[in-house]
Amino acid sequence: MLYLDLRDDTKHINNDSSRSAAHHVATLIVTHSDGTSTAIRQAVDILDYFEERFPDTCSLLPPAASQPRARALVRDFINMVAVDVEQQLIPAGNSSSNRTSVTGHGFEEQHQRAHVAFRRALASYQQLLESTRGPDGARTCLYTVGDAITLADVCLVPAVEQAVAYGVDMASLQHVARIYSHLKKLPAFTDFDWRKHATASRRL
């Protein structure tokens, strides 16, 4: 597994173009028994692959047969912090051709676009928490859906970290901030924090 500092464009663009011609940072190379390989290049698709490939290993999606509503709800939360944000960032995408200069007006415009996109996404996330859990439940919940980690939580943590990096004030997003703080104390998240790895050693 290779950890990358997303602020260093040249690091992943120069070294990883063979894995992803579009320079997507999240790329999973699956090697098959016949020696061929398949590249999966979207973060959510990679998570889905692991769910389907290892169904008996700590599933992070509620079972479709017995909890279809909860499963759909997890998907809804995921889309808020993944798909919706990505759409709002267009044309400022994840490739070198779409990145604006880190100096001057281009950077300021890109930064503001990202700030607004993440703020809106997390505000919608909190509103959905309140509508699905109720006022009391939203004030005390430690996970997005149910009482255990789901794929929604896996997607929420990096979304919050990016939002904070772009200057989003979490003070008005108490429910989201509480879930994030709880998740960041769990080994599943602390053990794989990119800051702990040499290839992404620069401070955020």
Image (tube, rainbow, N blue to C red):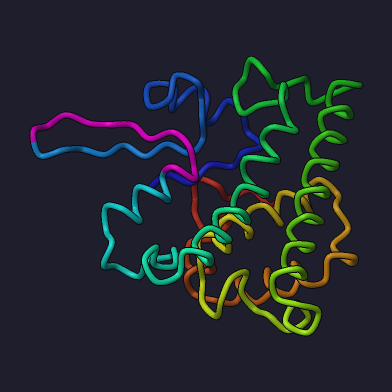
Q: Is residue 102 above or below residue 119?
A: above
Above or below for 171 versus 35: below
Q: Nearer the viewer, residue 23 or 68?
A: 68
Check residue 170 for magenta coloring: no
Q: Position of residue 139 (x, y in %)?
A: 78, 81
Residue extending farthest to the top is 97
Percent of width and height locating residue 33 = 10, 39
**What residue is shown at x 35% (from left), y 56% (from top)?**
51
* Near-viewer residue (138 or 58): 138
* Residue 140 higher or lower than 196, as above or below: below
Residue 60: percent from left, percent from top: 43, 65
Q: How many marks?
A: 0
Q: Is residue 195 left or right of residue 44?
A: right
Position of residue 30 in the picture relative to residue 176 (left or right): left
The one of 195 and 82 positioned closer to us in this rendering:
82
Q: What residue appears at the point 58 percent right and 55 percent down from the top-left corner?
A: 155
The magenta stretch is 34-45
Q: Left of 62 or right of it: where is 93? A: right
Q: Check residue 39 for magenta coloring.
A: yes
Q: Is residue 86 above or below residue 21?
A: below
Give the quadrant of residue 97: top right
**Residue at the image point whose x is 61% and y is 53% from the top:** 76
Give me the residue at 45% from left, 70% from top. Answer: 67
Q: Position of residue 83 (x, y in %)?
A: 62, 40
